[in-house]
Image (cartoon, rainbow, N blue to C red):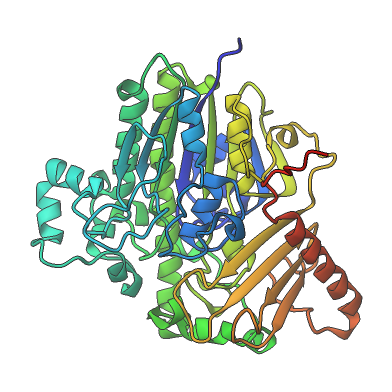
Amino acid sequence: MTKRPNILFICTDQQRGDSLGCTGATWAVTPNLDQLAREGALFENCYVQNPVCSPSRASLFTGKYPSNHGLYANGVPLPEGQRLFTRTLADAGYDCGMIGKQHLSPCDTWRTEPRHNDGYRVFEWAHGSNHRALENDYHRWLRKTHPDVYQGIFPDTGANENTEYSNRARTGTPIDHVPAKAHYSHWVGERAIDFITHERNDNEPFFLMANFFDPHHSFGAPKEFREMINAEAIPAPVTKSGELDEKPTPHRAYSEKSYSGTAPGFQDYSAAEIKEIRAQYWAMIALIDHEVGRILKALKDSGELDNTLVIFTSDHGEMLGNHRQLLKGPQLYDDLTRVPLIIRWAAAVPCGKRVPNPVQWIDLTATILDASGCSPGVGVQGETLIPLASGQTENFRPWALSEYRYSGFATDPLIMTTMLRYEDWKLILWHGPPACGNARDGEMYDLTNDPDELCNLFNSPDHIAMRHKMKWRMCDAMAEAEDKTRQDKRLW
């Protein structure tokens, strides 16, 4: 029997698909991730199924679209009975571990988020660096290894700041700017290395999920990594004069305030402050890259690198000032829905492969189960990416679907949007009654000629035929995405 591969899944939070040197950000300090791409396959158009943390992560763990797994918004728990792929791996003999952010349940209290039947033997949870839950394992580590840093930032236990503190911050909070050796990202790297080198079960293949919280806002990084970034080399945000007048009305509200009015918006910042936000963002990514390099070195030193399927990706993107907006929400630009994806597996993935086809986050579920020798499982809707990485593009779907169902902070009226990327066209529908109270509207972009999504062709008289074609394609994709797992019990 062929030896089953280990699986190392490295996930960041809120990282744009164009944020690495290998994906076009020439100013990025990402040597380790660029090297990983040279040793594996870089998927240039990977789309998540939702632009917000929890629904997106639930799609990964279940392999389903949000409309099928039921976790449609942050704060909504994953329904009982949804099977996680990590449970399948554990049942198949994998030694499973998770370090960092999970976010499959609400976590706004002093306690850890409730766990599902996840199969993890090791579960070291920390929703975020500012989250004051008693079970925050990053805080436990920080108190033990850097007690002076912890006490200086959290001098008492009387206030549970949680993540709202970060949402209101502008360019980082004190915990974001601690020395690198005390940072959340370093903790993830340290614990991942410990798992690989001496805490895993040597008699079983392992699955390890290393979940970084960065480059999630608030935008701040250790001084030594901020100094690596040349702010002058980073382009200004992508926009054009009068852009908001050509887009559905809610875009203007999300420019004025982020997170449905609960956080500062693009218009609250000066050009210089936006410039610094962008520099801090890439400083956070530089720190992640450094830690990824340490993890991969430990994996290589253990002798397991070439027998390990390594996946690097993120749960969604970040507006980062583009289109005069910050953070995330119902906008379904590539800024939020397209994420980095690198897959390295010496046994099956050619080196240096660049894959332009649209792929989806649910495909990662199918890929992991395929590589591990496990059956796809009931309800997994993605397709394995291993053949595509090897150049077998025939019959692979040419589209990706994202669904936003008032998934972030609630608005009045509620907002629902749906996106279809089909080949090089994109359609975004802003739904109206009876789904929600907003006026129906839409966006359509020709990504070949307008990759920055500046020119909305939805109401263009010259593109009526394409709009109708894309609407039919979206209807067909949504029909394909329906849950069809219940078996036909007829006896004839």
Q: Position of residue 140 (x, y in %)?
A: 18, 45
In the depicted structure, whether residue 19 falls above or below residue 234: above
Q: Residue placed at 50% from the left, 56% from the top? A: 15
Residue 261 spot, x, y in % from top left: 42, 83
Q: Is residue 239 above or below residue 73?
A: below
Q: Position of residue 489 (x, y in %)?
A: 72, 42
Instruction: Give the total of numbered labels.
Output: 0
Q: Is residue 459 left or right of residue 296?
A: right
Residue at image location 62% in from the left, 64% down from the top: 403
Measured along the vertical axis of the image, is residue 278 above or below residue 343? Answer: below
The residue furthest top is: 1
Report whether 399 appears left or right of 84: right
Horizontal relation, residue 461 to residue 188: left or right: right
Name the residue rendered at 10%, 47% in the picture. Answer: 147
Residue 308 position, x and y percent, is 52, 25
Q: In the image shown, does 255 or 271 lie closer to the viewer? A: 255
Quadrant of residue 219 within the rendered picture:
bottom left
For the C terminus, the image quarter is top right
Closer to us: 82 or 233: 82
Residue under the point 88% across and 85% down: 461
